[in-house]
Image (cartoon, grey):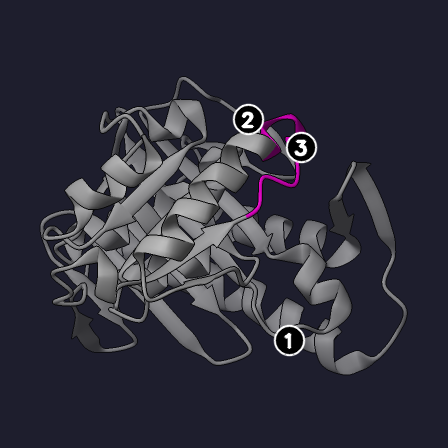
Amino acid sequence: MHPMLNIAIRAARKAGSIINRAALDGSPLQVRAKRANDFVTQVDGAAEQAVMEIVRKSYPDHGFIAEESGETTPNAEYLWIIDPLDGTTNFIHGFPQYAVSIAVQHRGVLTHAVVYDPGKNELFSASKGHGAFLNDRRVRVSKCQRLDDALVGTGFPFKELSRLDLYMKQLSTFMSKSSGVRRAGAAALDLAYVACGRLDAFWELGLSKWDMAAGALLITEAGGLVADPAGEQKFMELGEICAATPKIFPAVLEALR
């Protein structure tokens, strides 16, 4: 295992322990609205600080793009892209679908990824060129060959309700052309589920880099394809992503168009 991935895993597990402790504690959460339908708790902040402290001890010159702290040394050769608690709204309500997401980017290229579900103790990891894993088992995207047979994941554009009409058209298309659509509320986990074959495809609008970075590398290392809805590699910049098994990826793009 690459030393950098080892640090990412250690940091994700530390953040996960903070999240689990808060979930079991039962004490009232301090909830603050960052903007409409977008919330943060003291757990998000504590988990993010734990991740950054572990990384800084080993790599003091590296930069960060983190959901709560913003950008630190954004021009660094290595950037750690962190979502300490993807699915905060789920966490607030006790809905068990949330995760820690950590990715490492080297000169603009995603090189390491971890998505950790602390509730289920499922750790997804990948290093560029070395495959994707769930705990210690190598994973691959599903063998689904037709969109008609696909289970498709999605996320509502809850931060950008101005795009709701476009999204509803896309949703209607997938509902009529696939075997089912699921919306669980944590994009990082949804992408990890594509990587391990639990979902055959996924799309969402209005995401941030920390929602997508780790999951995107997991999928490509598991043999899947990732792009923006136009089929280009601009999903990190646009905040719009679609992913699928190779056989149905063209049909997914066509459906989004």
Q: Amino acid at mark 3?
A: Leu
Q: Residues within 10 Å of mark 1 (few under 14, many from 20)?
A: some
Question: Mark 3 sits on what residue?
Answer: 161
**Which amino acid type is shown beneath numbered disc 2?**
Glu
Q: Is residue 29 left or right of residue 240?
A: right
Q: CA distance from mark 3 to mark 1?
A: 32 Å
Q: Residues within 10 Å of mark 2 (few under 14, many from 20)?
A: some
Rounded to the nearest angstrom, the CA distance separating label 3 from label 2 is 26 Å
Residue 105 position within the rendered picture, expressed as x and y whole percent measured from the top left: 31, 35
- Mark number for residue 20? 1
Disc with the residue nearer the chain's start (1 vs 2): 1
Query: Where's the N terminus, which quadrant?
Result: bottom left
Q: How many marks?
A: 3
Q: Are marks 3 and 2 in contact (CB under 8 Å)?
A: no
- The residue type indicated by label 1 comes to Asn
The quarter in which the C terminus is drawn is top left
At 78% from the left and 37% from the top, the residue drawn is 36
Q: Residues within 10 Å of mark 3 (few under 14, many from 20)?
A: few
Asked if residue 71 is positioned above or below residue 179 in the image, the reply reads: above
- Residue at x 63% of width, y 49% of height: 49
Q: Is there any visible trace of residue 58 in the rendered image?
A: no
User: What residue is disc 2 on?
Assistant: 71
Q: Nearer the viewer, mark 3 or mark 2?
A: 3
Q: Residue at x 52, y 62 (%)?
A: 99
In this view, the residue in front, 55 or 177, is 177
Tell me if residue 160 is in the magenta stretch: yes
Secondary element type, mark 1: helix
Could you say whether the residue bearing mark 2 is in a helix, strand or loop? strand
Task: Tell me which segment is drawn in magenta.
Answer: 156-164
**In x, y percent, where is residue 207?**
51, 36
Q: Is residue 159 visible?
A: yes
